[in-house]
Amino acid sequence: MYTKESFIKYTTFAGLIALLALSLFVILNGWLGGHFNSAASLKSYISSFGIWAPVVLALIQMLQVVLPVLPGFTGCIVGAALFGSAGGFWINYIGISAGSIAAYWLAKRFGSPLVTKMISLKKYDRYIAKINQSKSYTVVLFLAILLPLAPDDFLCYFSGLIDMSARKFIAIVILAKPWCILLYSVFFANVL
């Protein structure tokens, strides 16, 4: 017998898988078409979706966290160029945050076998040893998500492997993630 909680859990998981599949399709189509070679070609690819361009950018940003196929700041450049600093910020923030949460949930659901497929076993062993020894992992995670060019995508996976609650992880993403994206969005909107 299904309970309300199990229904919500399975519906959320199915929705997440559907979003990941759609994102994967968009990314594969763009990658195979050579649209990820530069910010200009990515901008052209995303703008070709017309009214759906913001959704496509958000999906690409979401999936680039789950499957790191391009640097996240490339999407921030494109978002600022196509939608301005405010529009680019919100689209990138939603996409990257959703990807971070998806990476956490995938690691929670599938464990270390999935994470070791995402990164080399050597890196996995090094990261997991540091995380297990760290008494301040929450602070490290917050700073990694807050600061540009930190390996925060990988830490999202590792956060799903340890005993960190979803509520704490999501709060860290919501509070720390916008600042770097806002900085990128304002900078690139003014430069471009």
Image (cartoon, rainbow, N blue to C red):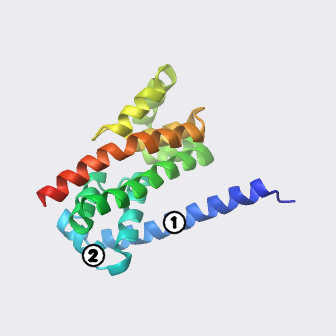
Q: Amino acid at mark 2?
A: Ser
- Tell me, yes or no, if residue 45 can be seen here: yes
Compared with 97, 121 (above or below) is: above
Which element is circle 1 on? helix
Q: Nearer the viewer, mark 1 or mark 2?
A: 2
Marks 1/2: CA distance? 20 Å
Q: Residues within 10 Å of mark 1 (few under 14, many from 20)?
A: some
* Residue 160: % across, % down: 55, 40
User: Relative to the observer, which residue lies in front, 110 or 18?
Assistant: 18
* Residue 121: % across, % down: 44, 37
Q: Quadrant of the C terminus?
A: bottom left
Residue, disc 2? 47
Residue at x 27%, y 67% (from the top left corner): 83
Residue at x 26%, y 52% (from the top left corner): 73
User: Relative to the observer, which residue lies in front, 145 or 119?
Assistant: 145
Q: Residues within 10 Å of mark 2 (few under 14, many from 20)?
A: some
Query: Which label's residue is closer to the chain start, 1 or 2?
Result: 1
Residue at x 41%, y 58% (from the top left corner): 95
Residue found at the very far left of the displayed protein = 191
Residue, disc 1? 19
Mark number, residue 30: none
Q: Amino acid at mark 1?
A: Leu
The answer to whether 53 appears left or right of 124 in the picture is left
The answer to whether 15 appears left or right of 44 in the picture is right
The answer to whether 177 appears left or right of 113 in the picture is left
Residue at x 30%, y 37% (from the top left corner): 147
